[in-house]
Image: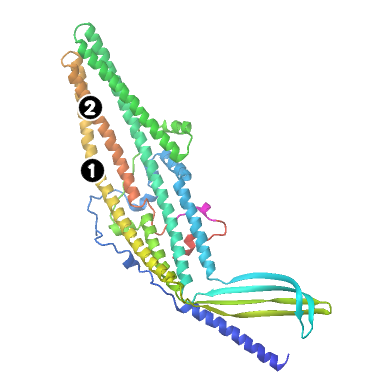
Amino acid sequence: MTKQHLLKNSWRTAIHAAVLSLVGVLTSCVTVGPDYDEQKATAVPNQPDGWYAALPHGGKLENLNNWWSQFDDPLLIELIDAAQGQSNTIAEGALRIAQARALLVTTQAAALPVVNGEASYSRGTTMLGGPIVLGTTSQAQVQLNWEIDLFGGLRRSNEAAQARLTAEVANWNAARISVAADVANYYTNYRTCEALEILAISDANSRQETARLTNQLTLTGFQSPANASLAQASAAEGASRAVAQKTECDLIIKAVVSITGMAEPDLRRKLATHRAQLPRPANIAISQLPAQVLSQRPDVAAAELQLVATNADIGVRIADRLPRLALTGNIGPINFSYSDGVINGSSWTIGPSLNVPIFDAGRRYANEQSAWVAYQTAVTKYRNQVRTAIREVEEALVRLESMRARETDAELASDGYHQALKAAEEKYKFGLSSVLDLEETRRLSFNADNILAGVRRDHVNAWIALYRAVGGGWNSNDFNQPASAFPSSAQNPKDSQP
């Protein structure tokens, strides 16, 4: 190799090294757009420093992770698992995760070189030094196109895609918590419905017995026909109420079948055990401040991640208004064959290309302003989500305190009316009271029993509402996700948290 060739190659190597060094410098020095400020973005005006409602005690928020198992009701856990496997909401959440993952892969790939292969074959005339000859040209090339992230727009796009992926995972967890709470409410309502049905049947039987006794007393002249008619009407009313209550229970079963996907005969067989027994929820202690409790709500976390994403979108739109730099090149052999011989060679090119926006009628500027508006909208939604979360916790706490006091009073009322009804029945048997007095006492006793059953149901449902309100055991470090939502080549969001 001649000295001239060596000098030429050394200059070529130096140029390549300079180009690569320049690319490295350009891709690491500038990132346009505002950096996400968590403290400023998540500040909620007038957020309380403490809870105003009375706080329950006897448990811990950490115990929420196995809260359902503390109910000591395996059927409830089975129903929750079945519903989560059948829920369209959860399935849609899993699909949104897969979609967000694909978008993240796309944005990550945009920052990497794109290499394509191309081959061509053509026949035609070519001038070789003077004469025009007919020949065949064949060529193969490897082409490179690499957009240099000159102002960090691609990095901002990747930041936004990562935040949206993690937000979808949080939304999926929120859906799981919501479905579990919904199933628990259905289950509690059904067990209460069974209790009310038992009360209605017992009341109907009692009214029927009173009607039978009144009819006998009427035949012997100790009661008037009007009283017999009244007793028969009361018995019919009780029987109708029992049928109506059974219908309500059947409707709840239909709803449970729909949400769990279980076969109705199997569900009824399983529900036959522990008839009319309400599950006993474990206590939840709320000792943390509102801001700390809200960190355990996946919907609040998802709302904040949308803040991160929309904040990064601003940088993407700002970068769109600035020049774009790309490195392009190709290399490959070329062959020309004609009647007198074959010419072989190779060709390569490499160099930067610059795209400078000049006029777009304000489109890019409008896109940037739209990104700022989207960020402010996300801030508003986040604040609303936080306020809603605080309200839901406070409401659940208020209901719990109310149910605790009401259940004690309802038990006293039910016991008192039971004793009064027994006394009224004895007095009526011996002709010491009228059928009107008996029916009035029966009505009061039946209403008291129904109120007690409803209060006990509401008490359990208040615990379930608190479970839902404090995030159901989820926390910001726990991004559980459906494995089936990701292709085998997809990256796990837990491996790339922002």
Is residue 293 visible in this depiction of the protein?
no
Can you name the residue that lies furthest to the right here? 340
- Helix, strand or loop at label 2? It is helix
Quadrant of the rendering where the N terminus is positioned? bottom right
- The picture places residue 197, in percent across and down from the top left corner, at 33, 28
Q: Are marks 2 and 1 in contact (CB under 8 Å)?
A: no
Q: Which residues are magenta?
A: 479-486
Quadrant of the rendering where the C terminus is positioned? bottom left
Lateral position of residue 96 relative to residue 299, left or right: right
Lateral position of residue 21 relative to residue 430, left or right: right
Can you name the residue that lies furthest to the bottom here? 3
- The picture places residue 164, in percent across and down from the top left corner, at 44, 61
Mark drawn on residue 402: 1
Residue under the image location 42 percent in, 39 percent down: 74
Amino acid type indicated by mark 2: Ser
Can you name the residue that lies furthest to the top here? 220
Q: Sequence order check: which comes first, mark 2 or mark 1? A: 1
- Helix, strand or loop at label 1? It is helix
Residue at which label 2 appears: 445
Look at the magenta stretch and give its main secondary structure. loop
Is residue 28 visible in this depiction of the protein?
yes
Q: In which image quadrant can residue 440 be found?
A: top left
Amino acid type indicated by mark 1: Ser
Q: In which image quadrant can residue 125 be found?
A: bottom right
Asked if the magenta segment contains residue 481, the reply would be yes
Q: Is residue 340 above or below residue 107?
A: below
Q: Is residue 311 above or below residue 100?
A: below
- The picture places residue 178, in percent across and down from the top left corner, at 39, 47
